[in-house]
Structures are given as C-alpha cells and as structure tokens.
Amino acid sequence: MRLPESIIDRVPVLALLEEDWESVSFTALGAWILFYLIVLGGAAAGGGLARWIDLVFVPIHEGGHLLFAWLGSQWLMVAGGTFLQLFVPFALAVYFALRRQIPGTAFCAFFLFEQFLPVGTYMADARSQSLQYVTVGDPDNAVHDFYYLFSHAGVLEHDTAIGGFVRILGWIGMLAVVGWLGWQAWLRRPALGHPALKTKAATPTPAPKTKAVRAPGPAAQSPAYDFGNLGSTLETAANSPFWQWFHLEHTGGQNGVSRFQPNGPKFHSLCYVDVTSSANGAIAAVTLGVQRKFVEGREEPFARDLVKSFLCAVLPERSDELERFVDEVGAEYGGSQPVITGPSAPTPRRAPAGSRPTPAYLVFIGRGKRCEMKSGAFEVLEENVTEGPTGWLCLRVKPSAW
C-alpha cells in the first residue's frame, strides 16, 4: 500500500501501512474463512456463534455509559454505550492493521461490523421498546438509548428505517471482510500445474518466477563463466561478500533455478536472487528481483544499495552504458544523495550537468518497461513485470553465448 509522502510526513505512524502483511498460510486463511462463514450462517438464522459474541459486548456497552457519565453530559452518557461498543473492535482492528497481522485485523473488523446487527435492532426498537435490555444503576430511571437520542435529533419516527440501514451496513462490512480474506488466500494459493518455487514461509506478495536458462551439460565441455565476485558456481556465490552482506539464504528451487532471499523479516519478501545453474553446478544466469514499492518507497536507499551492489558484484568490469547506470542508481539522478553500498561497490559519480538519464535508469524509476545492455561476454536484461497485484523490477545477467 503506497501512501502520499505528505500524509506520512504529517502522520508518521501511517508509514507502517506500507509494510507487507505478516506471513499467513493458505490453509490458515481457509480455516478462518470457514469460521466466518459459520458465524454468518448463524447470524442469518438469528442465533449461532454471533449471539455468544454479542454477550461479550454487553459489559463494554454498559461500561461506555459509566465512562462517559464522568463528562457530566446526559447526551454523551447515553451515546457513550454504543460508541464504546463499536470503538473497541475498531481500535483493535487498527492496531492489528498497523502490526500488519491479517488474522487479528480481520477478526476485529468482522466483529465490528457484526455489532452493527444488534445496534440496528436496538435502534429499530426506539418507539416500541419491546426488547428486554440490560442496564446499570436504578432500572426505574433507565431510558432507552435510541429513544432518547432519536428524540433529541428529531428522527424518532424513522427508527426502523435507520435500524434497518445500519443492519445492512453490518452485513456488507462482514461480507467485505470475508472477501478480503478470500483475496489474501488467493494470493497464497498453491500453484497448480506449474508449481512455483517452494519457500520456507508463504510471503504476502509472491515473487515472479525466473525463466530457466538452458545451460550446457557436462558433455558439452562449454567453458564456465566467471560472474564477477560471485564466481562460477553456487558454492562460490554463497560464500561471496555480496551474499554475506545481504544475508541471503536459500528459500527454494526447481528446474535448475535456486532462489535466495534476505533472512531478515523486513526485506525478506521485498527482493530475491535467482541463480540458474547447469547439472555440474556452473552458474548460467543470475536474476535480481526487487519489488517496485521497495524502489519507490521510504526504504528506497536500501533498494538502490541492493541493485548497485548486485551489478558491481556480478559485473566488476562494466561497459560505459552500465557504468553510467550504476552511477545513476548509486546517487539520485541530478541530486546529491549517495546511498550506502555493499562490498566492492565503488563511490557513485554524479551525472554531468544537463545530461539525460539512461534508458536503464528510466526503467529503474518506473518510467520505462524494458532495457537490454551488453558488457563484455554478458547480457543484462532489465524489465518491470507484474505478478498479481505486485510490481517487480528484475535484472537478469547471463553470458551472451547462452
């Protein structure tokens, strides 16, 4: 979720909403959806689990009356019951949303809207007052909340219409929460027919799969290519300074493609490195994938660090075009904000005054779709791709002969 910088500057806590949701398995989300469907079925039948949940909110409602009574206003005391009844699940839903926890956010949001049902029923009872209700204090002095509130607002004769509208909002909200959970489960669905790379934990935004590169088998006796500081094999790459600097760990593999991602939770789902290797372990291609929101968000310096360090590690000797692109990534184009870089990454040089950004840099900042470059015996393909709702910047390096 991308928010305008002006809003984040005013309310810094909203920057948390730009983070990924915490990992939840497809099976767990499916179980939660089944639970909510059971609750919905019971609510539609006029009972079920929803009735038991409603009992939890009775003391919260009555506590709202007592709490707001301290303000010395009869109107606030009467309205405070329903306000607290709805505010508690709303506040908890916001808390879990800022923590990026899907089950907690959905649970609190679902039962926030579920409480619209008894509130709507209570509203519709304002004139008839045929319901039995709980009160605190002297029952002889008790007043029906919405008879009092609607009378003061001059809308008492519309109590049933208002109550019915509130109940409809409750049903729409509950169904929307279940729909959102279904969408989250769809994003985490197991691949059918073309299994994706299996990872240690499901990630909120699956990275695009790298196309396998046909590498020559041992019988071909093709020379091994040296991918800069990564060397020529998976073993040498795993021991390289680039791997150690970014704490890359193996998270899956298939068809000769091994995937590596940072082991820290903050950046784990934001980027990956895919290494395509032949049967004898020789590296045939290396692909770096970085989420667009990582490149464009508040963590942009870290994304630039990763891209620049990757190119410098894989291609220590670069063509003039690639060298300029590396400089553009290392220092904001036309500005003076160099970023921290990993081992072997040189200090960036600012672009000459009046020069235009390279096509590769336009792809990097999202203003281009695809760019191909050559550097010695290697080809570099840079492109922006979309996998589901997620945009990715992908850089793929492979020998021109393969």
Image (cartoon, rainbow, N blue to C red):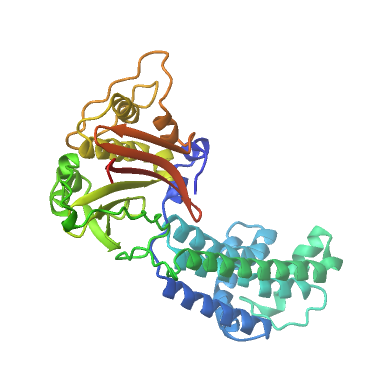
Residue 146 x %, y %? 74, 68
Residue shown at 55%/62% (left/top)?
90
Q: Is residue 315 left or right of residue 7?
A: left
Question: Is 295 or 94 nearer to us in this picture?
Answer: 295
In the image, taking residue 130 as reference, residue 389 lies left or right, namely: left
In the depicted view, which residue is nearer to us: 353 or 173? 353
Q: Residue at x 24, y 36 (%)?
A: 377
Q: Please say whether residue 181 is visible from this viewpoint.
A: yes
Residue 232 % position (x, y):
16, 47
* Above or below, comparing residue 328 to residue 176 in the picture: above
Q: What's the residue at 82%, 74% (across, down)?
A: 127
Specify whether 178 is left or right of 210.
right
For this orientation, the residue located farthest to the right is 157
Q: How many marks?
A: 0
Q: State the image quarter where residue 376 is shown.
A: top left
Q: Out of 81 and 225, give the one closest to the viewer.
A: 225
Q: Looking at the image, which residue sits at the far front?
A: 220
Image height check: is 380 above or below 184? above
Q: Is residue 144 visible?
A: no
| Residue 182 screen position, x and y as percent | 54, 69
Where does residue 395 sit, x and y in percent of width and height?
A: 35, 42
Name the quadrant containing residue 115: bottom right
* Vertical position of residue 125 compared to residue 375: above or below: below
Q: 276 or 365: which is nearer to us?
A: 276
Q: State the image quarter where residue 357 is shown.
A: top left
